[in-house]
Amino acid sequence: KNHPHHFVDYLIMGNAGSSELMESDTVGYRVLGVQPMSPAAKGGLVSFFDFIVAANGIPFKSLDTSFIDLIKASEDKPLPLSVYNCKNHSWREVILVPSKNWPGEGMLGVTIRFDTYFEAEENICHVEEVEPNSPAELAGLQPFTDYLLGTAEKVFKDPDVLFQELKENEDKPVEFYVYNSETDEVRVVVLLPTLNWGGEDGSEGSGLLGASIAHGFLHGIPSKCCETIGISNEGVTNRVINSPFGHNSAAFAANASSLPPLPEGLPPYANPQKVSSGLISEQQMNVHHVQLKMTAK
């Protein structure tokens, strides 16, 4: 029987003994949303940094339904996954038990996207100064310790991609994945890019974000943070996953009171219960969804 680690050995050695990975080999399912109390949450999967590259020893080399088929066949049974973490540059085996017996959607409770992890650790934008009353401040972005990673559809490989995303969503709420170097957590923030804001002194606001962004070698995640795989903290966002397997309603009804409450003081546009369903696109995929799209490089 194939074992997930055998696939890892193949990736490292290559069929010709090469130690270098090619971009075409470095693909898998990037972990995005992780629902609270789900099998994925119990397994410690980390949003944006984790890639599921194999399940039960079967590698995912192209976009197909093999992962879905494996999940269906493994309901209420252990399913070993080979996971690569691009922050920590490490491989690990994660055992998940696909199940409908938990208060959420789907059998794993994770949103994924087929993507490449080739040089993925370089695709971040560092938040520096955050202006008062700006969209960045209202979204809770922290100066110097926050790093913008991307959205459910794209990675912020440089500031141009970030600012294009802001422009396309002007005056509309958008969810950003953000890593914080102090807490070592990946969280989702709801941000409203707009020019209709101003400083405390009545001056006109600067830009759609109201924060200075840096990118490049000197603005990567600190090396001390790369000693860990990170933590997902998404308890109040991505509640609407729209799994084709539906909602685990019976379990949810019995456990609804245990869901974490929404934080107080959110601006009206930042209520994730109101905006999440409108932000789920065809490119953001539940682990059971068949309509996947390869992420454009």
Image (tube, helix red, strand yellow):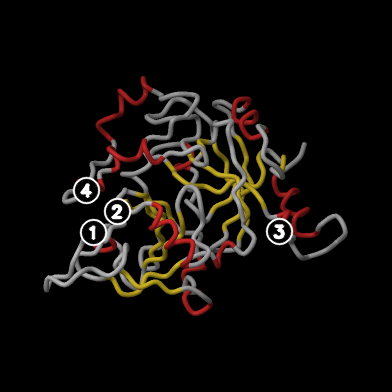
Residue 118 pos. (x, y %): 64, 60
Q: CA distance from mark 2 to mark 3?
A: 34 Å
Residue 219 pos. (x, y %): 47, 75
Q: How many marks?
A: 4
Residue 50 pos. (x, y %): 54, 52
Q: CA distance from mark 2 to mark 1?
A: 9 Å
Residue bearing mark 4: 263
Q: Residue furthest left?
A: 201
N-terminal-most mark, 1 or 4: 1
N-terminal-most mark, 2 or 1: 1
Q: Amino acid at mark 3?
A: Glu
Seen at 50% across and 25% down, the residue is 244
Q: CA distance from mark 4 to mark 2?
A: 17 Å
Residue bearing mark 1: 138
Q: Quadrant of the N terminus?
A: top right
Q: Nearer the viewer, residue 295 or 163?
A: 163
* Vertical placement of residue 264 versus 66, above or below: below
Residue 271 pos. (x, y %): 25, 44
